[in-house]
């Protein structure tokens, strides 16, 4: 749309204090939108500067808003975050699965609680600094991959529905990260070189196992070799481990009978969790057969269009964020689940994580790995 077409239309931008949301707001302002900023505070349990940067982020947001000449509203969604995201996050870990909090955080907080609040502010649209795209096609809204494939975040957004996408703008869809930083520098935004945030959504970067231990009690048990049932170590809680995990097992020097080409013993990887008997099973070697599967069952399905894709068509899917798309086909199991079969075996497919399905650049949706 032209500047004149956007004039007088209000968009509320989720400002995090980072360079991406700052440039998103700047681009919308340049396009003629009446831009309002919204800063969300969603974690209060231990809001210290050591791990949770919300205080500094708010300072950065106010500086960005001052530079761009926009107003900012500050809202506390800590209660909603605890109820809608964190409670489920903990229960999944307690059950032995590995949830993806960013997926829930996007669908429940950034595009639900935030969207509702923005409507109360008089917004016609909301916008974020996510690297993804949205377009209207044949009467439906599609979620698209970003131009910058190394930063694409559509995987975390697959649970967005038609109503949410119809209200959303992604100003960075066609930009590369390097260009975003360059634009911020040229606009004299002080966050141009600010480090990207990582870690748990809204909770920040922190030693993850130590964090979980505060909420989930330790329960020591055996670490066994899956191939021969030999006890080779001890774990302090199945909840603290995930399939495919290599670090933090403290069994690196243990012999399991398998050596690499250089004579050294291959690394150990978590292959299975026996919740009933509190046993952690491990295998040696990254490509051990126990770590490879060519099909999975997905539950809690969420399709962007509102309808399940065609069965037995060739699509592409990924079972974790940092992974290349892999050819697959879908078979319906029932109204709430489906079977996804891959052309090539997938490594360390992890219950609780999300499998996300694509057709070229279009994100069709997905579900939670059973």
Image: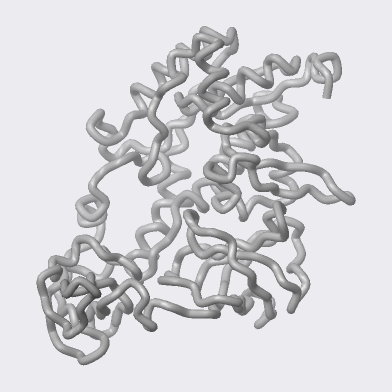
Question: Which residue is pictured at 25% across the width and 71% down the height?
Answer: 238
Q: Give the left or right position of residue 230, taking residue 295 as reference.
A: left
Q: Give the left or right position of residue 135, taking residue 266 as reference.
A: right
Looking at the image, the residue that sits furthest to the bottom is: 228
Looking at the image, the residue that sits furthest to the right is: 138
Colouring style: one colour
Looking at the image, the residue that sits furthest to the front is: 262
Residue 169 drawn at (x, y percent)? 69, 34
**275 relative to 150, above or below:** below
Residue 198 drawn at (x, y percent)? 38, 41
Residue 368 drawn at (x, y percent)? 53, 67
Residue 249 drawn at (x, y percent)? 18, 66
Front residue of 221 and 248: 248
**184 relative to 114, above or below:** above
Front residue of 88 and 367: 367
Indicate the quadrant containing the N terminus: top left, top right, bottom left or bottom right: top right
Question: Which residue is pictured at 57% across the width and 26% down the height?
Answer: 179
Q: Give the left or right position of residue 89, taking residue 369 as reference.
A: left
Instruction: Quadrant for residue 193, please give it.
Output: top left
Question: Which residue is pictured at 38% across the width and 69% down the height?
Answer: 97
**240 relative to 146, above or below:** below
């Amino acid at each position: 749309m032209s500047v004149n077409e956007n004039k007088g239309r209000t968009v509320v931008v989720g400002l995090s204090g980072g360079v991406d949301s700052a440039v998103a707001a700047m681009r919308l302002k340049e396009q003629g939108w009446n831009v309002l900023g919204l800063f969300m505070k969603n974690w209060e349990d231990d809001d210290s500067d050591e791990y949770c940067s919300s205080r500094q982020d708010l300072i950065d947001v106010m500086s960005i808003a001052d530079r761009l000449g926009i107003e900012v509203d500050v809202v506390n969604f800590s209660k909603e975050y605890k109820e809608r995201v964190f409670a489920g996050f903990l229960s999944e870990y307690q059950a032995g699965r590995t949830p993806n909090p960013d997926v829930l955080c996007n669908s429940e907080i950034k595009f639900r609680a935030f969207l509702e609040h923005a409507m109360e502010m008089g917004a016609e649209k909301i916008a974020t600094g996510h690297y993804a795209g949205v377009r209207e096609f044949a009467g439906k809204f599609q979620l698209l991959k970003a131009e910058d494939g190394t930063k694409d975040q559509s995987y975390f957004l697959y649970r967005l529905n038609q109503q949410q996408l119809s209200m959303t703008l992604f100003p960075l869809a066609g930009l590369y990260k390097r260009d975003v930083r360059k634009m911020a520098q040229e606009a004299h935004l002080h966050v141009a070189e600010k480090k990207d945030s990582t870690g748990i959504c809204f909770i920040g970067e922190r030693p993850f196992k130590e964090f979980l231990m505060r909420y989930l009690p330790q329960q020591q048990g055996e670490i066994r070799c899956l191939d021969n049932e030999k006890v080779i170590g001890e774990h302090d809680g199945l909840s603290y481990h995930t399939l495919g995990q290599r670090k933090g097992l403290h069994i690196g020097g243990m012999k399991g009978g398998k050596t690499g080409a250089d004579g050294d013993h291959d690394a150990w990887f978590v292959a299975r969790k026996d919740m009933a008997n509190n046993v952690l099973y491990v295998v040696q070697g990254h490509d051990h057969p126990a770590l490879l599967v060519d099909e999975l069952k997905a539950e809690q399905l969420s399709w962007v269009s509102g309808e399940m894709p065609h069965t037995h068509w060739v699509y592409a899917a990924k079972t974790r964020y940092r992974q290349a798309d892999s050819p697959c086909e879908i078979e319906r199991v029932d109204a709430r689940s489906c079977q996804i079969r891959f052309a090539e075996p997938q490594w360390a497919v992890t219950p609780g994580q999300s499998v996300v399905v694509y057709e070229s650049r279009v994100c069709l949706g997905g579900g939670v790995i059973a």
